Image: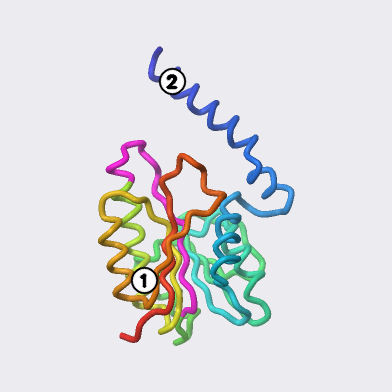
Amino acid sequence: MTRKTRQHKKSAAWMHEHVNDPYVQRAKAEGWRSRAVFKLIEIDEKDRLFKSGMLVADLGAAPGSWCQYAARRIQPGGRVIALDLLDMVPVAGVEFIQGDFRDDDALRRLETILAGRQLDLVMSDMAPNISGIAAADDARVIHLAELTLEFARQHLKPGGHMLVKVFQGAGYMELRRSIQDLFAGLQVRKPGASRDRSPELYLLGKGKRLS
């Protein structure tokens, strides 16, 4: 079997699974942009992430199901700022910045929107393009989580929370310790909507400590 044939079969199997995924079907029926929203809904139901009037940043937001849900949950008076390198179709109640949240230009735009206010919640469902090489993929995901933590260190208010996706591989325990240094509490969540074969977990840092 050629490499091209193997890739075609793998792609066809993924498409079959995706089309028949009950979370995909439910997201389409309920008007959500992706099945990922059900991970956030489950964590929110358990941990009560959202309250009216909150200021929330969604890093790596596209296609937008997390900020779509958050924007509904923080009304009246709440605001969601979404950032992504990719373009994103506008979401009601969401202010979108296209760019890399590490770059000065994107940060300046964010700070203009914040107008001196700090965030109540930073959330990130970011993942790199998966190579299939576990060690490399783990390292990339942990690096994104570390960047999210640094973003939270700078822009999250004392007492605020951070929710970030990770893989449980090399660097995971070190990241956990860094989160515990910054936050009063740490919860580990594996939502039911996460596919069984997925190594993803979500770390929830609760109550940012005073610097």
Q: Quadrant of residue 203?
A: bottom left
Residue in the image at 35% along x and 82% along y: 209
Quadrant of the drawing holding the C terminus: bottom left
Q: Which residues are magenta?
A: 119-137
In the shown orientation, is residue 64 left or right of residue 187? right
Question: Is 136 in front, or is 89?
Answer: 136
Element under disc 1: helix
Q: Amino acid at mark 1?
A: Phe
Q: Which residue is mark 2?
A: 6
- Which amino acid lies under the numbered mark 2 shown in the image of this protein? Arg
- Tell me what residue is drawn at x 64 percent, y 35 percent: 19
Query: Which badge, 1 or 2, comes first in the chain's sequence?
Result: 2
Mark on residue 67?
none
Decide if residue 148 is on the left or right side of residue 171: right
The answer to if 123 sits in the magenta stretch is yes
Label 2, secondary structure: give it.
helix
Residue lying at the far right in this picture: please name it.
Answer: 29
Provide the residue designation for mark 1: 151
Residue 117 painted magenta: no
Residue 29 lies, in percent from the top left, at: 74, 48
Residue 161: x, y in percent?
45, 74
Picture layout, residue 48 above or below residue 188: below
Above or below: residue 17 compared with residue 152: above
- Give the percent coordinates (x, y) of residue 1: 40, 12
Crowd tier of the residue under label 2, counting other residues whose Cα lies within 10 Å: few below 14, some 14–19, many 20 or above = few
What residue do we see at 68% from left, 43% from top?
25
Residue 146 at what x, y percent from top left?
A: 31, 63
Q: Nearer the viewer, residue 27 or 181?
A: 181
Quadrant of residue 130 within the rendered picture: top left
Q: Label 2 near label 1: C-beta < 8 Å?
A: no
Say few, some or many: other residues with alpha carbon within 10 Å of mark 1 (under 14 / 14 to 19 / 20 or more). Answer: some
